[in-house]
Amino acid sequence: MNLRQLEIFHAVMTSGTTVGAAEALGMSQPAVSNAIRHLELVVGFTLFERLSNRLVATEEAKLLYARAEPIFQLQQSVNQSALDIKAGHIGRIRVVATSEVTESLVPMAMREFLERFPDVFVVLDTKPLHNVLEAVEAGIADVGFAIDPGERHSLLLQPIDELRTVCICSADSPLSKLPFVTPQDLAQERLICPLSGTRIAMLLEEAFRKSAIPYEPKVEVRFLNAAARIVQEGWGVALLDEVTATSGHYSDLTVLPFEPRIPRPLTAILSRSHAVSRHSREFIRTFTLTTGTRIAEIRG
């Protein structure tokens, strides 16, 4: 398959219809349909089931789309570079971060950085952790920021700070009167926890196991700010990082330290195979300083 076929496939996957893909690509709908049929012949399997004028991606199509995602990201990066050059931006930095970091820490660093470097053009993208790592690894982003990124040989992880794991609950919960919470305190609570398989979920499971308390979340979430919102709606208690819990959006909730202590490393992520620009280094420096100030405020 060639890049044009992949581009058409991507457009159909994202729009869900050949009409939407045709509009996005400036093609006719029959041309898109023919291209998809030809691509199915090339790959040797069905990409879409056609049900009542809708296209439903097959499992094979979803797998192919996931494998091709870095190509689409690289294409976006090249397109953005062309726009930057056309616009005459004299400096640029591409930052990618997980939603927890983007919501509470990156905006402060962005303000400080742009006050010092007003002529630098900044691209900020928010992605799930695995996409943050892939974006930096592929050179699509210059620097990434995440909590608990794990190890990856191709990436250089620069520690920023060590966040604490906390519990948030409603202000009228009996838990709110405790100085801290333990697995024993949460044994009868409806738990909202990080997604299974993540590093923090495995550490929480181990902490509960050592306390002889079953680790049985009722809800698992990928983005921990969603956990806080569920608690705000009056359901359950959540275990998350202290920065998300004290971002200012959940002031009606009580935040309590979780024991045993489970550290959450906050990390800047760089590629080992790409040179680090001066602006990237300056942004990391600014992020580190503003984060340190913010965490000091959190801890009083």
Image (spheres, rainbow, N blue to C red):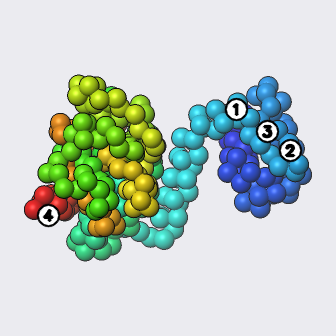
Residue identified by numbered label 4: 297
Q: Which mark is residue 51?
A: 2
The three-letter amino acid code for the residue at tag 3 is: Phe
Residue at image position (31%, 46%) is 239
State the separation of the CA atoms marked 4 and 2: 55 Å
* 164 sits to left or right of 106: left
Residue identified by numbered label 3: 48
Q: Is residue 210 visible?
A: yes
Residue at image position (24%, 48%) is 166
Badge 2: few (under 14), some or many (20 or more) residues near its Cα, within 10 Å? Answer: few
User: Percent position (x, y) of residue 15?
Assistant: 71, 54
The mark nearer the N terminus, 3 or 1, is 3
Residue at image position (35%, 49%) is 238
Image marks 2 and 1: residues in contact by CB distance under 8 Å? no
State the separation of the CA atoms marked 4 and 1: 48 Å
The mark nearer the N terminus, 4 or 2, is 2
User: Percent position (x, y) of residue 286?
Assistant: 20, 61
The three-letter amino acid code for the residue at tag 1 is: Glu
